[in-house]
């Protein structure tokens, strides 16, 4: 896999990146290899169609949304730094993080993870999950046998449960409250460990 | 009740058949002079058949049973077994609780009982030859061909570990403990020496996948577990056979020499590797042959089967592991062959392999039942009970210890529940059975061993097979009372799980990505050029869509119903949409909420990893959820393509990013025109030069994300004009790709659509749309300029 140091040198601003995201050098190298493998044309950045080539992602009901999350509005490409920063959301939560009010929250804090999830719902980025957006998500995640009426009642019920200020939409705060019950929030995906599968 | 009648009818029907046949045969020695020499008579020849009756007068009506005896008996047995299988599935509740193997064995008992009554001998099909040459290869080919390769290779080390070391552990452990038991005078089996014990132990440590995998599938077990059991069973066949040969070799020798033992251990590696190499060789040769079968499609399946079988036989010739050979052959072959052969051949191959494998398996269990009743048994309480005990004990211990050792090396370690499933799921079956029968006669206690094997098999298959499912369910059910969870939590949880899975896929599951990458490069550069007929590097997404479309098309042709309903609901939902917009807050009863929970749990797409989307042992692979998702995406893609020229700037720009095909392309243009004929799909691929687009196909673009684009009210004429400009600009971005399709798209002017591409059964359109989009789907002829050649179009817009 190439010697550690030489690969690390190829990546610009590696130290900063590691600091900001909390990934170790092994992880960074692994992600870099993956980035390069995805970037088949060797341009140094990824386009949506590079993500699209991943077959399993196409089979994921919310695959499109996940890909969309990598691209900020207006951007067409993802460079390595952005790639890593977004993936940093999925690192396990640092339990012993000292509460330093001055430094910004680490990317993998619980709150940022929730924001990421919220963003998957809220595609028009208005800070609220409207009923329509909820319906779209439901359609994506449910099989074809579910009728429109059933979907709508589920959506209505969802909003009813979460919506405290009666504006018929779920804001981030409401989302956060409701998600408090989800205990296994953002378990780190297993590929983040540097060990190899046997 | 109708069901009961059917079951009784079936049962009585074939009991009747059996009695008829055996009664018939007992009387069938009429008026016939055997023409075949005795040596050619079938091994299962029974009494009375060779009565020649010279000098008989000419009969008007003759019965010539001996002539057709062999094929007739084979056919009858197979039919009986198949009826049994049909019978079980009629009464569905049984198969839920009792694995099929149990049922088959029971039927075998019944038939054996009948045969015993009429004092018939069972067909001596279980000669060594018949089993190993005819019955085992189809089963192994079935397993090998349908093996899910990616998880298999990812877990290769684990699989090998459990298979090889586990089996060794089991055999040696059981052998030694049994030897210790033999020393106890009370059991009276002191004359069984160590070698014989080891031999017996190696027979009963072979684990059999059939029942286990069926149960695992039903309870949606963890993919990792599934593949470990699957692989273990495959490999430990090989290991067992090698051990068996090793020990039987030793067992007949009065004195064991150390040198010999080492030689034998060395031969183990030779055997294993030799099998693999031979399999690879045959696999490549087979793939190469299919390159040239373009003109003779009919013989393609034959090539596949015969090459695999040939690999098996040649391996048997050299006494190397034939099972490894055939499995490796199937694995290697599959990838290349499926690209070379026609779709029909592909289907035929799969079907036939499944069919023959299934028949073979059925027969084996069936015979197990029959033979149990009809053989002479030698019973020894102590020995046999202890055998059973040790078999269970050592397996449990073995799994425990082995897992502890290998867990640190795995990224997904096995927890105790998994280990329990693994050890309890160690059912014995066909291979043990066959090996027991082929024990050399020189072993004094052969009958005892046979009885012991049968007892172990029956115990594990019946007791463990039936109880494993409730036990696993019990262990899995540690969920909180679902009704306390809110709907919100369920939805969000699932979304997050999908996200995690998605990100995992993004990061690449292959730890040894380096090697896979290297192999794929080598593959693409060299191997594919040699073995595949037209080596277009097809991206996997295009291949996937291609398969989907075909399947979809074929299914539509099969079942025309059900899709008619797609159209009306579109309209209905549209109207309802408008009504609901102004609905007041609904009140939800608790029963409503429960219903919702049920709905969600039944219908939400399962996470990729947790779903065993691989083959059920007894049916062909289907992947309904994946298809739905992809079809949805695909239809939305097509809609956006069609609507592509009418979009507002921003929205279209976003949509272009996510198209899984270059704009204006359809799936069909990815194929050489000869394959699918002229496809009249939507936008004009006719104007696209096929070869020049080769680089594009490497990078399929994603279909437009419905959620990404906000709904925009559209104004036709303005949009068309601006969209033309925008599209031009878009095209410049795409590398070297100029289409003239814009011209034809502009001709679809005046047609206003919403920007929202969507799966058509639940359609949600822009309110300004005036239902135009809706109506365009059910009736393609409203698309003015693009009518008739849409052969495929009506098929495409119906997702299943």
Image (cartoon, rainbow, N blue to C red):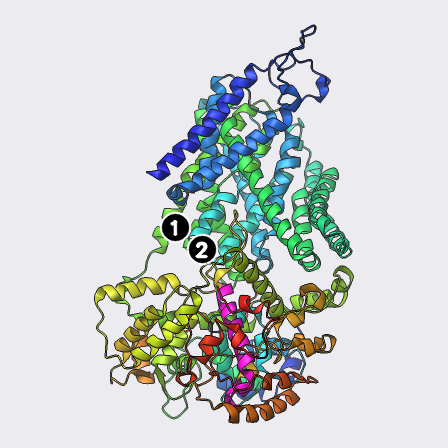
The numbered mark, 2 or 1, whose residue comes first in the sequence reads 2
Q: Does the magenta-highlighted stretch encompass residue B644? A: yes
Which of B153/B399 is in front? B153
Q: What is the chain identity of the residue bearing mark 2?
A: B
In this rendering, would B311 be left or right of B478?
right
Q: Does the magenta-highlighted stretch encompass residue B242? A: no
Could you tell me what secondary structure mostly forms the magenta stretch?
Answer: helix
State the quadrant of the N terminus of chain B.
Answer: top left
Residue B369 point in image, percent of width and height: 49, 30
At 62% across and 91% down in the image, what residue appears? B729
Q: Which mark is residue B472?
A: 1
Residue B430 point in image, percent of width and height: 55, 37
Position above or below: B577 against B731? above
Q: What is the chain identity of the residue bearing mark 1?
A: B
Mark yes or no: residue B239 visible: no
Evaluate if marks 2 and 1 touch, with contact meaning CB atoms under 8 Å apart: yes
Residue B246 point in image, percent of width and height: 65, 36
Q: Which mark is residue B221?
A: 2
What's drawn in magenta, residue-wise?
A: B626-654
In this rendering, would B420 be left or right of B326?
left
């Amino acid at each position: 896999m190439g010697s550690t140091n030489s690969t690390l040198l190829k990546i610009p601003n590696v130290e900063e990146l590691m600091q900001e995201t909390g990934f170790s050098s092994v992880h960074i190298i692994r992600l870099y290899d993956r980035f390069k493998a995805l970037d088949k044309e060797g341009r140094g950045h990824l386009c949506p169609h590079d993500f699209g080539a991943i077959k399993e992602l196409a089979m994921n009901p919310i695959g499109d949304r996940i890909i969309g999350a990598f691209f900020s509005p207006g951007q067409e490409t993802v460079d390595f730094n952005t790639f890593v920063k977004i993936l940093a959301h999925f690192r396990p939560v640092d339990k012993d993080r000292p509460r330093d009010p001055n430094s910004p929250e680490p990317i993998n804090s619980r709150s940022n993870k929730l924001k990421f999830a919220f963003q998957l719902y809220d595609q028009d980025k208005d800070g609220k999950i409207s009923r329509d957006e909820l319906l779209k998500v439901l359609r994506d995640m449910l099989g074809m046998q579910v009728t429109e009426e059933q979907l709508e009642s589920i959506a209505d019920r969802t909003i009813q449960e979460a919506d405290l200020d009666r504006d018929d939409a779920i804001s981030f705060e409401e989302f956060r409250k409701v998600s408090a019950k989800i205990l296994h929030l953002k378990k780190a995906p297993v590929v983040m460990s540097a060990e190899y599968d046997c | 009740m109708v069901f009961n009648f059917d079951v009784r009818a079936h049962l009585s029907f074939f009991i009747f058949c059996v009695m008829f046949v055996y009664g018939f045969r007992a009387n069938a020695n009429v008026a016939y002079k055997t023409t075949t020499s005795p040596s050619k008579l079938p091994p299962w020849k029974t009494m009375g058949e060779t009565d020649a009756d010279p000098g008989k007068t000419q009969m008007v009506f003759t019965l010539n049973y001996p002539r057709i005896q062999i094929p007739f008996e084979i056919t009858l047995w197979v039919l009986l077994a198949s009826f049994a299988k049909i019978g079980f599935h009629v009464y569905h509740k049984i198969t839920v609780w009792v694995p099929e193997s149990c049922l088959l064995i029971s039927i075998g008992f019944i038939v054996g009982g009948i045969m015993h009554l009429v004092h018939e001998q069972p067909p001596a099909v279980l000669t060594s030859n018949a089993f190993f040459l005819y019955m085992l290869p189809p089963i192994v080919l079935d397993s090998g061909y349908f093996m899910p390769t990616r998880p298999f290779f990812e877990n290769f080390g684990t699989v090998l570990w459990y298979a090889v070391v586990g089996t060794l552990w089991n055999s040696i452990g059981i052998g030694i403990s049994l030897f210790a038991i033999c020393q106890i005078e009370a059991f009276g089996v002191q004359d069984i020496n160590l070698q014989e014990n080891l031999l017996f132990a190696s027979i009963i440590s072979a684990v059999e996948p059939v029942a286990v995998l069926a149960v695992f599938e039903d309870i949606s077990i963890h993919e990792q577990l599934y593949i470990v059991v699957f692989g273990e069973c495959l490999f430990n066949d090989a290991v067992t056979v090698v051990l068996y040969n090793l020990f039987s070799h030793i067992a007949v020798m009065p004195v064991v020499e150390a040198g010999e033992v080492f030689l034998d251990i060395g031969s183990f590696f030779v055997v294993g590797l030799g099998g693999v190499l031979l399999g690879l060789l045959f696999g490549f040769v087979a793939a190469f042959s299919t390159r040239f079968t373009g003109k003779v499609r009919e013989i393609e399946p034959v090539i596949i089967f015969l090459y695999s079988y040939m690999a098996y036989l040649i391996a048997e010739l050299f006494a190397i592991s034939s099972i490894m050979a055939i499995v490796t052959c199937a694995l290697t072959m599959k990838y290349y062959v499926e690209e070379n052969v026609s779709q029909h051949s592909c289907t035929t191959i799969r079907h036939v392999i499944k069919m023959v494998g299934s028949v073979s398996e059925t027969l084996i269990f069936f015979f197990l039942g029959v033979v149990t009743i009809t053989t002479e048994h030698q019973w020894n309480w102590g020995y046999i009970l202890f055998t059973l005990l040790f078999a269970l004990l050592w397996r449990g211990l073995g799994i425990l210890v082995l897992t502890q050792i290998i867990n640190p090396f795995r990224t997904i370690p096995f927890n105790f529940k998994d280990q329990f499933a693994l050890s309890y799921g160690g059912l014995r079956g066909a291979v043990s059975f066959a090996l027991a029968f082929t024990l050399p006669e020189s072993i004094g206690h052969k009958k005892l061993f046979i009885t012991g094997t049968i007892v172990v098999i029956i115990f594990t298959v019946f007791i463990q097979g039936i109880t494993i499912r409730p036990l696993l369910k019990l262990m899995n059910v540690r969920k909180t009372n679902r009704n306390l969870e809110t709907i919100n939590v369920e939805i969000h949880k699932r979304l997050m799980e999908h996200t995690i899975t998605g990100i995992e896929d993004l990061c690449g599951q292959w730890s040894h990505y380096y090697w896979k990458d290297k192999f794929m490069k080598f593959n693409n550069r060299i191997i594919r050029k040699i073995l595949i007929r037209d080596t277009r590097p097809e991206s996997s997404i295009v291949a996937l869509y291609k398969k989907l479309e075909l399947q979809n098309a074929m299914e539509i042709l099969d079942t025309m119903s059900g899709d008619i309903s797609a159209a009306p609901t579109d309209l209905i939902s549209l109207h309802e949409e408008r009504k609901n917009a102004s609905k007041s807050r609904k009140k939800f009863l608790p029963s409503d909420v429960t219903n919702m929970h049920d709905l969600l749990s039944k219908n939400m797409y399962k996470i990729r990893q947790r779903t065993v989307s691989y083959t059920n042992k007894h049916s062909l692979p289907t992947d309904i959820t994946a298809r739905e998702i992809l079809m949805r995406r695909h239809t939305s893609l097509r809609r956006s393509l069609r609507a592509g020229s009418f979009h507002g700037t921003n929205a279209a720009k976003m949509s272009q990013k996510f198209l899984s095909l270059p704009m204006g392309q359809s799936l069909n243009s990815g194929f050489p025109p000869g394959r699918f004929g002229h496809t009249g799909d939507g936008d004009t691929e006719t104007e696209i030069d096929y070869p020049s687009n080769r680089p594009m196909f490497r990078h399929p673009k994603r279909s437009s994300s419905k959620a990404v684009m906000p709904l925009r009210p559209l104004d036709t004429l303005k949009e068309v004009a601006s969209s033309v400009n925008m599209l031009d600009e878009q095209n410049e971005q795409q590398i070297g790709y100029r289409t003239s399709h814009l011209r034809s798209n502009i001709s679809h002017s005046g047609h206003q659509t919403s920007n929202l591409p969507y799966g058509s059964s639940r359609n949600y359109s822009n309110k300004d749309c005036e239902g135009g989009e809706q109506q365009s789907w059910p009736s393609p002829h409203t698309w003015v300029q693009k009518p008739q050649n849409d052969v495929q179009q009506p098929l495409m817009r119906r997702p299943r």
